[in-house]
Image (cartoon, coloured by chain):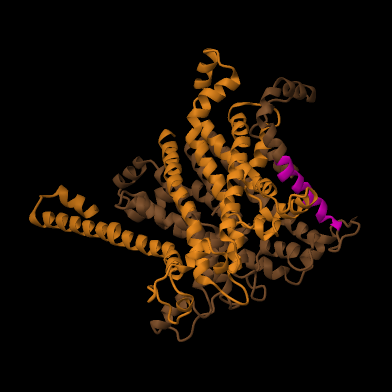
Chain colours: A orange, B brown
């Protein structure tokens, strides 16, 4: 750079032109190398790392039990069969695992958690976003803090509490336990969405004769619908994937959720890897689908915040 | 605890009010409490009560077979710490947490830097790299258990086929490889979280800073060390804290893949707590003591994090939004979502 400037000061001769051209070329090659080859190379390697377990999951799920245990392992099976997917309706094929029932249980518990979290969190989050009342800050720090602490700390007392309340092996008991993590998170998420709505809107509604609650109901809630939907889906997925509470608070096979049921494909007598992988793949689909939608939403929210700032 | 609350409240402590005024204020504001009342009741049952109960349990003797409980002070803590496996559990937890956090940050930062620029297929790569984060912990654990299988594992199989090794590697059945193998799974699962946070942070850096640096003659590397890194530091800090907390709290991946074995070589703190309570004869009192310990250890990080968030939200909106995104994603605090 310094050389080039110095040369510029003298007469612009051929060697200078040449040097500039060479520097430019070098820069271009450098930038192509870094921008394109390295960038894409790295991203492709990362993507393979991220995705190959799913490919292997799928590959295993379409194998016969014999071919699942072939050395060396085959990525593309010689005999492609979808018989492992029978486990969703045939309990006999699934080691007497009633996967359909687990699916139902997971759905009930996840929807229950979603509805309760959102119903309770929406007014609370609104109050945290808008009102000033004594005790607000300590309460809110606890909500923030809850997300930091291990669920295991809550597990023993909740286990005893559910036993006392006779809520073991009970959908409501599980939903209640899930609120431990779902509710604080929902309040925190929703508060962020309410914060983004200008206070002037409520003021205008109040001037037009709305009560405070009316303004919240008729003006603010409709504007927050995307945020509420995002929070609802987040709660759903949290409950759908949850394992530690489900496995501790339910012992009755009829109440098993999917993550708990997955473990029962492996035991001393048989290891049904094809079936396990089939179930794992299918139950990941709703989660991944939801998240790809949500991800766009959240990233947009993040970048918008950045622009506004 | 006392100091924690005090420092937390400081930024807000608005006015010196007498207690009578507080009650009057509360009465005047009774309408506000109706909004938070349902949340308060539910959190009382599922958060405050368990917290008090776990502390109570930790200072009482409880027989696994029932019978009267009596106050024993810190005996349970002493017994939990003097457990012969306690040192290795601590060692494993430190290795697990630090290595996972650093690797997830490095991979996440690399991916974020590449995705922050306008390249083709950016959305596609971002979505693909995000997927491991969202699937269930149990699903992730089982597919890796199959990948690491001692006889039919696909990685060993490929390496044998290529002639690099002659017999399968026993990843999770070997005392020396089990922890590194589990860390690989954990990093695979959580690096997307670091990536998304850092990506948002990178996109918030004003373009003018780079242009100014360019005019001053800074090359690529200088722009990275002198613009990107310092500008990104707040986000890196938040991401690190959240990752550390998540890793200390990790349970499912380790539990499903190895159950802490072989020979305690992959037993980390939370799986250890769980084993005390729910494996073999139930030692709720020891589990509670350990739970209280990790609770207070993590509170240091939590306080730090909350202070960071509140300070940033005061000075800078951009960062606050990032923090929000961060916590939102942590919600998946590995055990929960993802």
For residue B158, side relative to residue B216 (left or right): right
| Residue A214 vertical placement versus A266 (above, below) | above
Q: How many marks?
A: 0
Q: Position of residue B337 (x, y in %)?
A: 56, 52
Helix, strand or loop: magenta stretch? helix
Q: Position of residue A169 (x, y in %)?
A: 71, 54
| Residue B265 vertical placement versus A252 (above, below) | below
Q: Residue at x 66, y 60 (%)?
A: A253
Q: Residue at x 42, y 33 (%)?
A: A308
| Residue B164 vertical placement versus A301 (above, below) | below
Numbered range of the magenta stretch? B43-61
Q: Quadrant of the N terminus of chain B?
A: top right
Q: Position of residue A83 (x, y in %)?
A: 46, 68
For residue A135, side relative to residue B181 (left or right): right
In which quarter of the view is residue B177 placed? Answer: bottom right
For residue B208, side relative to residue A217 (left or right): left
Task: Work out whether residue B194 can be spotted.
Answer: no
């Amino acid at each position: 750079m310094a050389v080039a400037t110095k040369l510029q000061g003298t007469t612009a001769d051929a060697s200078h032109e040449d040097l500039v051209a060479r520097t430019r070329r070098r820069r271009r090659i450098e930038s192509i190398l870094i921008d394109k080859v390295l960038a894409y190379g790295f991203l492709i390697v990362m993507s393979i790392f991220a995705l190959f377990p799913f490919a292997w999951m799928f590959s295993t799920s379409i194998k016969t039990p014999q071919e699942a245990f072939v050395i060396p392992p085959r990525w593309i099976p010689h005999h492609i069969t979808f018989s492992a997917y029978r486990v969703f309706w045939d309990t006999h094929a699934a080691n007497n695992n009633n996967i359909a029932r687990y699916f139902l249980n997971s759905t009930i518990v996840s929807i229950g958690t979603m509805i309760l979290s959102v119903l309770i969190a929406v007014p609370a989050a609104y109050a945290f976003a808008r009102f000033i009342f004594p005790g607000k800050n300590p309460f809110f720090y606890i909500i923030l803090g809850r997300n930091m602490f291990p669920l295991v700390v809550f597990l023993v007392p909740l286990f005893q509490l559910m036993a006392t309340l006779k809520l073991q092996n009970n959908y409501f008991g599980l939903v209640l336990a899930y609120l431990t993590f779902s509710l604080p998170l929902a309040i925190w998420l929703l508060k962020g969405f309410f914060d983004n709505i200008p206070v002037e809107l409520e003021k205008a509604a109040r001037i037009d004769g709305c009560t405070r609650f009316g303004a919240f109901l008729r003006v603010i809630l409709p504007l927050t619908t995307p945020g509420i939907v995002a929070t609802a889906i987040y709660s759903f997925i949290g409950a759908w994937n949850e394992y530690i509470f489900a496995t501790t608070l339910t012992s009755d096979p009829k109440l098993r959720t999917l993550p708990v049921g997955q473990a029962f494909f492996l035991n001393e007598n048989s290891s049904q890897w094809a079936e396990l992988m089939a179930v794992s793949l299918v139950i990941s689909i709703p989660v991944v689908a939801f998240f790809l939608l949500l991800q766009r939403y959240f990233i947009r929210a993040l970048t918008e915040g950045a622009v506004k700032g | 605890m006392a100091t924690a609350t005090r420092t937390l409240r400081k930024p807000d402590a608005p006015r010196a009010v007498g207690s009578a005024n507080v009650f009057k204020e509360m009465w005047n504001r009774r309408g506000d409490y109706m909004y938070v009342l349902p949340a308060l009741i539910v959190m009382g049952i599922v958060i405050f009560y368990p917290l008090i109960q776990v502390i109570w349990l930790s200072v009482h003797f409880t027989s696994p077979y029932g019978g009267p409980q009596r106050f024993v002070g810190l005996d349970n803590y002493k017994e939990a710490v003097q457990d012969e496996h306690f040192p290795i559990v601590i060692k494993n937890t430190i290795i697990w947490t630090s290595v996972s956090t650093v690797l997830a940050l490095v991979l996440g930062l690399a991916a974020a830097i590449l995705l922050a620029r306008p390249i083709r297929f950016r959305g596609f790569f971002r979505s693909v790299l995000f997927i491991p984060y969202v699937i269930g912990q149990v699903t992730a654990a089982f597919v890796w258990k199959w990948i690491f299988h001692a006889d039919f594992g696909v990685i060993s199989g490929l390496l044998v086929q290529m002639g690099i090794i002659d017999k399968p590697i026993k990843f999770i059945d070997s005392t020396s490889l089990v922890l590194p193998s589990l860390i690989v799974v954990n990093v695979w699962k959580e690096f997307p979280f670091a990536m998304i946070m850092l990506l948002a942070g990178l996109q918030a850096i004003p373009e003018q800073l780079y242009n100014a640096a360019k005019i001053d003659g800074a090359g690529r590397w200088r722009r990275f060390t002198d613009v990107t890194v310092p500008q990104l530091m707040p986000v890196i800090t938040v991401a690190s804290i959240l990752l550390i907390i998540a890793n200390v709290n990790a349970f499912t991946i380790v539990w499903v893949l190895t159950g802490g074995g072989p020979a305690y070589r992959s037993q980390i703190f939370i799986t250890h707590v769980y084993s005390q309570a729910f494996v073999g004869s139930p030692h709720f009192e020891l589990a509670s003591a350990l739970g209280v310990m990790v609770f207070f250890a993590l509170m240091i990080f939590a306080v730090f994090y909350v202070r960071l968030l509140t300070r940033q939200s005061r000075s800078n909106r951009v960062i606050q939004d990032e923090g929000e995104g961060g916590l939102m994603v942590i919600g998946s605090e590995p055990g929960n979502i993802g």
